[in-house]
Each structure stands twice: as C-alpha cells, then as structure tokens.
Image (tube, rainbow, N blue to C red):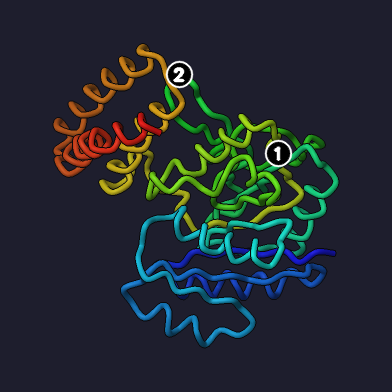
Amino acid sequence: MNKLYIILLNYNGYQDTIDCIDSINKCEKKLDYEIVVVDNCSTDDSYNKLKKVKNIKLIKNPVNNGFSAGNNLGIKYALEQNAEYVLLLNNDTIDTVDSIYKMLEKIKSDESVGILGCRIMYYDNKNLINYYGGSIDWFKGTAIMHNYKKEYQETQNNYFYCEYVTGCSMLIRTSILDKTGLLPEEYFMYYEDVDFCAKAKESGYKLAVTGDSYIYHKASSASGGEGNPFAIEWNTRNRLLFMKKYNFKFRSYLFFYLTRIIVGMKYIIKGKNKHFKSMRKGIKEYKKVRRKVWAN
C-alpha cells in the first residue's frame, strides 16, 4: 500500500490541530500515512506547540497567502515524496475508525474519480449532516451543500458521483494535478475548492462521495446562514471572481447585483452595518483583481 499524505493547515488553532492528529493516530491503524502540518504564519504560539508533536512533518509558512497557498506547500512536499494521493483535511475535524482508510480504498477501486469526499457530520450534533454531496449552481455561481443540516438516514446509496467536494475533506489523486494544476491561490479564502472541483470536472475527472467514511466537523450546527462580516466579504469577492473565470452570462451578474441590493437593504434595516460594509468591500475588492483574471 502506498503511503497517504494527510495535509492539515493550521492558523492560530494548534489545539484543534493536535486533537485532529490524535484522532487520526487513534483511528487509522490499517493506514500507511504521514501527517503534514503547514503552519500558515500563525500569530500565536502554534508553531512552537506543534514542534513538540511527534511523527509529523511540520512546515512553517513565513507568510499567510490563504487556504490554497498554505495547502499547496503541503501538496508540493507530498509530490516530492512521489505521493499518489493526498488528503486535505480541516484541522478542526475529528476522524472516526478507519474512515480515511476506507476513503483511500474507495478511490483506488474507481479510477475514474479524481477527487473523493466523505460524509461530514457536526461535532456538536453528531447525527446532523454538515456535508454529504454537493453541486455547483451555474446560474448563481454558488456551491450547494446537499443534505445540509439534515439528519443522517442509513441508505444503500452511500457512494455516488457529484459536482462539488468540500475542501474540508478532499482526497485527491495526484495524477490529476498535471491537468488541473495546484489549488487556485487567487481566492485567499472560500471558493478555491469550488474552482478546483470545476477544473477537475472540466479536465475529465469524476468527483464522488462515500458515506461509509465519515468525520466530525467542529463548525457549529446552530450558526446562522448569514455569516460573519469576514465571510461575507470574501464570499462576495470570490463568487464574482469565480463567475468571471468561468464566463458566466450577463443574466447571472444581473441576478447577483439585484439580490445584493435586496440583501444590503435587509442588513441596513436590521442594523447590521458591518455586514453591509463587508459586502460592499467584497465587490470593491473583486473589481481590483478582475482585470488580472481576465488577462489569464
């Protein structure tokens, strides 16, 4: 069995990262793996704490250029070791027995699949789904998380193809990188996994999800759908950037801006001025980078 390289990106979250590492070491007795931790220029004591963790490859990124750039450092290291598969895994996840092992066995058995995801459940509500399949709305320019916040029900159809696999848990066949390239770094945060999945599909690879493998994600199951100002800014910017890269039609932009007017009015009425300003900032930031994307 070829060694699997499991990449965890850490930014000011060493305790979550250590918990994730411990869960992998406890649950994956059948798996030949190496854990690669990229510390993405943390401003707390993360790097020094992680240096004390045994049997990991720790990479210190001197600058934080976002999710993709940090993970790409780990991917490059894995490629130097001739890795055939890499798993991108959020550092705030908890593994379950043999889940990663089962993912690897599943992708090996289906050579048409370039990216494989697993069932992701909420850590604070373990029967509630965070992710179990996904698609891309090619009119709105958004990723759709199927079965989001639904209770999990046992089903025989626990392996299926899809259009979007979340970067929270993404098993990649490294041979696809010859066509897709590494993760796109122009997004910084959010939408890089959407773009990467779209590129993989465009390059002729299938994406799939297996429900036999599941992990727990520490994202709150009780959080609202509007997001925080940081998420609103970057999701707004990057949604437009994704639409630009994939040549969305005028009607999609018209829908986007009309709905942003409505959403903005709701923010103002509710007194959420920070949310409104973040949305406007996201649009302005997109306008700064769109010429560069157009040139590419």
Left or right of 73, for residue 85: right
Left or right of 101, for residue 291: left
Q: Position of residue 4 (x, y in %)?
A: 72, 63
Q: Quadrant of the N terminus?
A: bottom right
Picture layout, residue 121 above or below residue 251: below
Q: Specify the farthest residue to the front.
A: 295
Quick check: can you spot residue 130?
no
Query: What's the residue at 59%, 56% (across, down)?
Result: 88
Residue closest to the eye, 193 or 263: 193
Q: Which of the numbered marks, if any, corresponds to residue 118?
A: none
Picture layout, residue 49 above or below residue 27: below
Return the residue at label 1: 208
- Numbered disc 2: secondary structure: loop
- Numbered disc 1: secondary structure: strand
Query: What's the residue at 43%, 21% (across, down)?
Result: 247
Q: Residues within 10 Å of mark 2 (few under 14, many from 20)?
A: some
Return the residue at label 2: 139
Q: Position of residue 114 (x, y in %)?
A: 70, 42
Residue closest to the eye, 77 or 146: 77
Q: Earlier in the sequence, mark 1 or mark 2?
A: 2
Query: What's the residue at 18%, 26% (across, down)?
Result: 265
Query: What's the residue at 45%, 56% (across, down)?
Result: 69
**Residue 248's image quarter?**
top left
Q: Residue flagged by tag 1: what amino acid is it?
A: Ala
Measure how far apart labels 1 and 2 are at the Cα level: 22 Å
**Residue 67's image quarter?**
bottom left
Q: Position of residue 238 (x, y in %)?
A: 36, 37
Q: Residue flagged by tag 2: what amino acid is it?
A: Phe
Quick check: can you spot residue 275?
yes
Q: Total label count? A: 2
**Residue 242's image quarter?**
top left
